[in-house]
Image (cartoon, grey):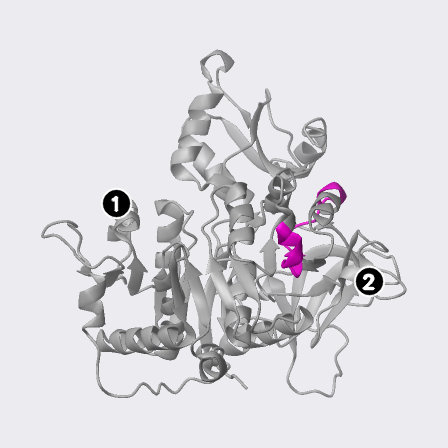
Amino acid sequence: MPILLHHLFSESVNQHGNSPAIVHKNNTWTYQQLEQLVQHQAQALRGIHLKPQQRVAVYLPKQIEAVTSFLSIAQAGGVFVPVNPALKAAQASHILIDCNVQILITSKSRLRILSSVLENCPDLHTIILVENEIFPGEFNIAQTVLCWQDFLSATIRKPIKPATIDTDMAAILYTSGSTGKPKGVILSHRNIVAGTKIVSDYLAICSSDRLLAVLPFSFDYGLNQLTTSLFKGGCCVLLDYLLPRDVINLLAMETITGLAAVPAIWAQLAKLEWPETINAHLRYMTNSGGKMPKSVLTAIQKKVPDSRFFLMYGLTEAFRSTYLPPEQIDIRPDSIGKAIPNAQILVVREDGTPCAAHEPGELVHRGSLVSMGYWNDPAKTAERFKPMPGQLRELPLTEIAVWSGDTVTMDEEGYLYFIGRKDDMIKTSGYRVSPTEIEEVIYASGLVKEAAAVGIEHEELGQAVVVVISVENDDQFHEQVLINWCKTQLPNFMIPAKIMVLNTLPKNPNGKIDRKALAQQFASLFKRES
């Protein structure tokens, strides 16, 4: 059985070597071809002196070089850091700086986006481009830039045998917190492998499955589509999601058997016509990243009545926590289910004592999926990763669990129900968004006096980003100017859906802007739209 991340597809290579592993547009790679690419790239990484546990960022859309990079970085003993291709230069450079990335794998178009901020990345020394040619003077930057061919020619003949064990770092995934910049969640090889085994088991993924990878690989939910497929010898079809019609077309054209999405995508897909043929091969669907609206779920189920739908809940800090089996959906459609196999989910009060049935409390996750904390941030790690409540005092070493920050209830049968978050995080389109990160951009525009970002319930998005501001002069303020500024500084999922102007923003007793009061004030803002 696999121990390390890059071992996940070793058995598939032996048993399904000539079967398709990855499909991207008109290209298909078998398991044997994928292994050859990974082996070659791993040797090349060692050839440019990748050191054990060194971070390598991958800033690419879903394409074969992204897949081989994750696997080869792990095999060469490094740590891969997927950067969401939707991020702009400011957000991407924060990741490069925060976890001291020294090698970046990207494309020419994205390097041009980053070129203005690379001087702020002192640790970054080598940039590898997926294109096969670089023209003289094309990039006037301090870092060494290698085209793909030159990079691959840097191979060494010595066998790669880094002293990696399953508790070593394998990846760092960045997720937003309620304050400040995104934090890097450190995943060990054990975390990723365990999550792959558990999810592929309860979804019954097998070698005949064809999974459509719609979600970004920088999202743990999206990355799992790739790892479960490779582990079970299935085929992973890569799609950079642009239009909902693209998803429907590929479902039919590629005879997809498994589809994972977030509520915002499901809401878009529910409005489209689906070919009846999809029902004959789409075996299962899953939702995570937010509550699935009942109306959307019903609409999707009518389009593919023979497909099984799994409602799931998870957080990057522990990957996947619960799932609701399809046979329970009609019985308890509001539930996020029970704990996944080999995990325990507790609902506790602030003092750590267990809640009674139906009593709201904080969801606490314990088990092999609990990650290694936040990169270089012991203070924030201590807030979220705390001793598991109720453990025996006689145990000399303390077990650490993830305290999610989410308020839930549990019924008498052990089924869980999501209520809300304890902090101010905005959950939109499957992403966790920091309100302060948006507010910093709003203030930097110089157009406002006060600003607060809040999440307002929205049928399709889960929550919509609403920014409430006050300005010096109402007559001189133009909303579209501020929106245009946001579009240059923020990825699409963080751009405000609405901007509301007040004379002054409410404050709490400490003098801080009261986001909760604003959320209540505008709670019905999208009721008519939904």
Q: Residue furthest top?
A: 475
Residue 112, image x, y percentages: 25, 46
State the residue position of label 2: 415
Considering depth in this image, is 345 or 438 the residue closer to the camera?
Answer: 345
Instruction: Give amino acid for label 2.
Output: Tyr
Residue 453, image x, y percentages: 57, 36
Q: Is residue 53 visible?
A: no
State the residue position of label 1: 116
Which residue is at 31% across, 76% downward?
A: 42
Q: Which mark sits nearer the N-terminus, 1 or 2?
A: 1
Residue 357, image x, y percentages: 89, 61
Q: Quadrant of residue 22?
A: bottom left
Q: Residues within 10 Å of mark 2 (few under 14, many from 20)?
A: some
Which residue is at 70% across, 87% downward?
A: 395
Considering depth in this image, is 453 or 472 the residue closer to the camera?
Answer: 453
Q: Residue furthest left?
A: 136
Is residue 498 positioned above or below 377 on the image? above
Residue 454, image x, y percentages: 61, 37
Secondary structure of the residue carrying numbered label 2: loop
Q: Residues within 10 Å of mark 1 (few under 14, many from 20)?
A: few
Considering the image in quadrants, where does the N terminus appear? bottom right
Marker disc for residue 363:
none
Instruction: Give amino acid for label 1.
Output: Ser
Residue 232 on the magenta span: no
Which residue is at 62% across, 52% downward?
A: 278
Q: Is residue 490 visible?
A: yes
Considering the image in quadrants, where does the C terminus appear? top right
Residue 295 on the magenta span: yes
Q: Quadrant of residue 514?
A: top right
Which residue is at 29% across, 56% downward?
A: 121
Magenta range is 277-296
Is residue 1 positioned above or below 5 on the image? below
